[in-house]
Image (tube, grey):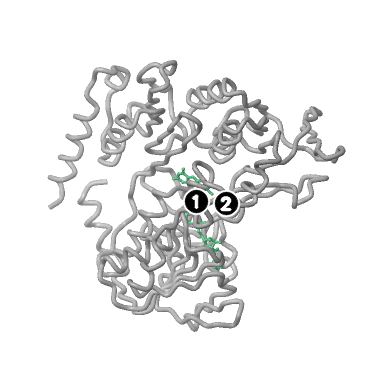
């Protein structure tokens, strides 16, 4: 990822300068795009259409430190921000259709919004499987503020919750529930926790951590069916085990909201397919955030990421392109999750890696796992080690690596390597 490559690819960068920009969605990506456009002195019209009626809010606190009493949640921006920046916020409004020939989006109430450039920031929705016997009203999920309120409203009556899915959100909520003395069983279809994104060694750390907190974990198992027994529900697992429970939280992952794009004839493949500038198969339409399947220099093939970092950085990349400074999207993916007393931070993408190097002692509750492909560092997972995480971000962003022996040596100065990496990056910009 040299600057030469940048310049060569830069020759094909689009230099469109639209006047009217419509953004579909009102989540992290949409709001950051609008804010970034104004920071870049975009003087045209900006309309943001979101189907949720709440003032745009942050999702991460919903599964971490959500306070049931606070109706306002954690707004992404103060209400006054939108008017002050001439951002037309249409909340509780659904985009039904895109007319690409006429360059208008059509809302369900018949409103037509013309655009020169359209940005799809439609996010994702929870996967909710059809489980025999499960009354949809009895299932809990967590994606929206409304979901968080439903969960909060039931907290006082819950003695036991079954969590379907041992991923980030299922485990964060399991910790919140245990913190309130609620019994929790987590049912995971794979043979380890957070297996889609974490290394086996880190999954194993979390298995022990959650088991110690009193969370019962089931692996290679699924919720097969649900029956009712007096006031409670009985969950029947695929292996025949039964669990008496008060509620079932479905947390088995998300699906991209790509139906609008598909219906408009845009290329879709587990998300809205975009190029390195985040343009869809129609160059007047971009897609960003959870809904976008994009080429990422830190991954093989197209990838769809569900993270705040990705939503923000993609928004900024598109804002740059629409204000005359086109750029390729090449940001390092990073992520965090808070589970009980553990703050997990991940830099890079851990797929297809070799033998890991553990830095520090997992028993101390503060350590990192360095993941390599051959001799190349590709990802670092840290538990309560923000200094390792920040150093890893610097090193990986610069396309650098650290030898395995150095990664394993807790006295070795990673911060120094990250500093060198920053220097390499700064001095190679001509
Ligand atoms: C409970 C929870 C905890 C999380 N914790 C973390 C974390 O710790 N760290 C982290 O990095 N990430 C976390 N994430 C993920 C992160 O919040 C998301 O990646 C990010 O919010 C994605 O932003 P987005 O704008 O792409 O999509 P979204 O936030 O999903 O916003 C898209 C919006 O578009 C709306 N929309 C869709 N279709 C239409 C339409 N046709 N018309 C109008 N509106 C439409 C949707 O309803 C939605 O409101 C968490 C997510 C959840 C749910």
- Residue positioned most to the right: 230
Q: Where is residue 273 in the image (x, y as percent from the top left)?
A: 48, 59
Name the disc covering residue 14, or none.
Answer: none
The reply to whether dot 1 and dot 2 touch (C-beta < 8 Å) is yes
Within 8 Å of ligand 1, the CB of disc 2? yes
Between 88 and 350, which is closer to the camera in this rendering? Answer: 88
Q: Position of residue 108 (x, y in %)?
A: 61, 77
Between 379 and 367, which is closer to the camera in this rendering? Answer: 367
Q: Is residue 38 visible?
A: yes
Residue 206's place in the image compared with 266, above or below, is above
Between 212 and 304, which is closer to the camera in this rendering? Answer: 212
Q: Quadrant of residue 347?
A: top left
Q: Is mark 2 on a helix, strand or loop?
A: loop
Residue at 49% x, 84% y is 102
Residue at 57% x, 59% y is 257
Q: Can residue 261 be seen in this view?
A: no
Q: Pointer 2: what residue? A: 143
C-alpha gap between disc 1 and disc 2: 7 Å
Within 8 Å of ligand 1, the CB of disc 1? yes
Q: Position of residue 54 (x, y in %)?
A: 53, 63
Q: How many marks?
A: 2
Q: In which quarter of the image is residue 335?
A: top left
Q: Position of residue 353 (x, y in %)?
A: 44, 30
- How packed mark 2 is, by other alpha carbons closer than 10 Å (few <14, some 14-19, many 20 or more), is some
Residue 281 in the figure: left or right of residue 130: left
The disc, 1 or 2, on the residue closer to the chain's N-terminal end is 1
Q: Pointer 1: what residue? A: 59
Between 43 and 282, which is closer to the camera in this rendering? Answer: 43
């Amino acid at each position: 990822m040299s600057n030469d490559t940048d310049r060569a690819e830069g020759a094909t960068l689009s230099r469109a300068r639209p006047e009217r920009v419509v953004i579909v969605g009102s989540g992290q990506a949409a709001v950051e795009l609008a804010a970034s456009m104004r920071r870049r002195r975009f003087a045209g019209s900006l309309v943001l259409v979101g189907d949720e009626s709440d003032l745009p809010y942050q999702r991460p606190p919903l599964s971490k430190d959500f306070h049931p009493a606070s109706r306002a949640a954690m707004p992404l921006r103060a209400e006054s921000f939108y008017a002050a920046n001439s951002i037309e916020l249409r909340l509780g409004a659904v985009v039904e259709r895109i007319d690409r020939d006429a360059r208008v989006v059509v809302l369900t109430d018949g409103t037509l919004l013309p655009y020169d450039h359209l940005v799809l920031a439609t996010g994702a929705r929870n996967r909710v499987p059809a489980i025999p016997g499960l009354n949809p009203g009895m299932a809990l999920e967590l994606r929206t503020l409304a979901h968080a309120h439903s969960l909060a409203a039931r907290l006082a009556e819950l003695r036991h919750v079954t969590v379907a899915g041992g991923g980030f959100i299922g485990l964060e909520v399991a910790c919140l529930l245990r913190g309130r003395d609620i019994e929790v069983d987590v049912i995971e279809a794979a043979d380890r926790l957070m297996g889609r994104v974490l290394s086996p060694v880190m999954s194993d750390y979390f298995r022990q951590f959650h088991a110690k907190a009193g969370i019962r974990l089931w692996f290679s198992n699924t919720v097969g069916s649900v029956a009712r027994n007096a006031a409670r529900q009985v969950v029947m697992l695929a292996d025949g085990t039964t669990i008496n429970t008060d509620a079932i939280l479905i947390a088995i992952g998300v699906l991209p909201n790509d139906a609008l794009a598909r219906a408009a004839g845009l290329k879709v493949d587990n998300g809205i397919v975009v190029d390195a500038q985040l343009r869809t198969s129609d160059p007047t339409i971009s897609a960003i955030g959870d809904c976008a399947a994009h080429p990422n220099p830190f991954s093989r093939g197209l990838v769809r990421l569900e993270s705040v970092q990705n939503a923000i950085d993609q928004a900024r990349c598109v804002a740059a392109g629409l204000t005359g400074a086109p750029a390729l999207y090449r940001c390092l993916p990073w992520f965090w999750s808070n589970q009980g007393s553990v703050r997990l931070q991940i830099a890079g993408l851990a797929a297809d890696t070799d033998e890991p190097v553990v830095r520090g002692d997992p028993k101390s509750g503060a350590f990192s796992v360095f993941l390599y492909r051959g001799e190349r560092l590709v990802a670092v997972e840290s538990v309560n080690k923000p200094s390792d995480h920040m150093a890893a971000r610097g090193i990986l962003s610069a396309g650098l690596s650290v030898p395995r022996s150095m990664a394993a040596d807790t006295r070795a100065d990673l911060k120094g390597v990250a500093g060198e990496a920053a220097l390499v990056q700064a001095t190679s910009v001509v």
